[in-house]
Image: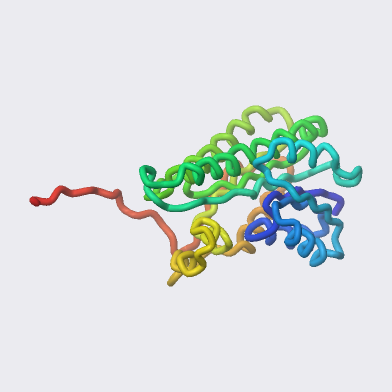
């Protein structure tokens, strides 16, 4: 295998699981994240693989541009970009939430994804090959209380992915939006700002998706024959489905 994958947000969850699977399959890896120590530990764990780590915050446009424009020669031909870096913060209703949380989600889930895509896409088009795999969410398709800005950012990911496909028609560059449902990782710990007990309640009595499940799906999509483009793939655990419409009923009080 002489291919290179770039995975953002590689220090935990889906990103770390993808890193391990792609390494096992013999790919070269470019792994990015904000936590240098975790990146170094992952690089050491994958010491039998060819790994280049980049400490960067995808919200920082200059950092992203500088990091990708100064890649070592052996890592400059990127076959797959997994835009995994993203987060949710809080579940308060819109009129009570912290505006800074909204800004962080927009800056990470929307702007960060745009910055990374724009940095690597021109080379893919020039080479007439490549694959952008964006990590969306069922929250981009289905609303729920407290989802407000997080769901809106994932709706952006969905539409951005579809529009990329339109722009890239006539090239061999593929675009896929993976839309997971309930999945157990650090996602809820981040959402509840380190409150592990509260995060655990999200998964009580369920059999959620695992990071390894998503890594398997992402790898499968990335290694399909070049004539096949999976536009979007929504995946939920068997224990999850949709509920009835919410209806507020007046009382006589």
In this picture, is 242 found above or below 208?
A: above
Residue at 80% over, 53% down: 53
In this picture, is 23 found above or below 61?
A: below
Which of 225/118 is in front?
A: 118
> Residue at the left extreme?
252
Rendered location of residue 204, percent (x, y): 44, 70
Rendered location of residue 191, percent (x, y): 51, 56
Q: Confirm whether residue 45 shows in the render.
A: yes
Residue 220 lies in quadrant: bottom right
Which of 93/121 is in front?
A: 93
Residue at 51% over, 60% down: 188
Q: Quadrant of the N terminus?
A: bottom right
Rendered location of residue 47, percent (x, y): 85, 64
Q: How is the image coloured?
A: rainbow
Residue at 58% over, 43% down: 109
Q: Confirm whether residue 140 shows in the render.
A: no
> Residue at the right extreme?
73
Which of 197/232 is in front?
A: 197
Residue 174 lies in quadrant: top right
Residue 49 lies in quadrant: bottom right
Residue at 49% over, 64% down: 199
Rendered location of residue 118, percent (x, y): 71, 33
């Amino acid at each position: 295998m002489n291919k290179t994958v770039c995975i953002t947000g590689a220090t935990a969850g889906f990103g770390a699981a993808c890193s391990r699977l792609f390494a096992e399959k013999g790919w070269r890896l470019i792994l990015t994240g904000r936590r240098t120590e975790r990146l170094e530990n992952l690089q050491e764990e994958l010491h039998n693989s060819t790994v280049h780590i980049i400490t960067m915050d995808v919200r920082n446009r200059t950092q992203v541009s500088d990091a990708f424009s100064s890649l070592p020669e052996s890592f400059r031909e990127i076959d797959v970009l997994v835009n995994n870096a993203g987060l949710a913060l809080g579940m308060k209703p819109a009129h009570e939430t912290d505006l800074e949380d909204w800004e962080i989600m927009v800056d990470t889930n929307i702007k960060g994804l745009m910055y990374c895509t724009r940095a690597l896409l021109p080379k893919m088009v020039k080479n007439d090959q490549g694959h952008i795999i964006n990590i969306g969410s069922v929250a981009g398709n289905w609303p729920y209380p407290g989802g407000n800005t997080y769901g809106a950012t994932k709706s952006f990911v969905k539409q951005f992915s579809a529009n990329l496909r339109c722009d890239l028609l006539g090239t061999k560059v593929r675009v896929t939006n993976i839309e997971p449902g309930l999945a157990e990782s650090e996602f809820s710990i981040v959402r509840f700002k380190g409150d592990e007990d509260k995060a655990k309640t999200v998964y009580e009595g369920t059999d959620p998706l695992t990071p390894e499940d998503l890594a398997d799906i992402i790898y499968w999509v990335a290694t399909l024959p070049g004539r096949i483009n999976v536009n979007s793939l929504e995946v939920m655990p068997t224990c999850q489905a949709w509920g009835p419409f919410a209806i507020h009923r007046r009382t006589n009080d």
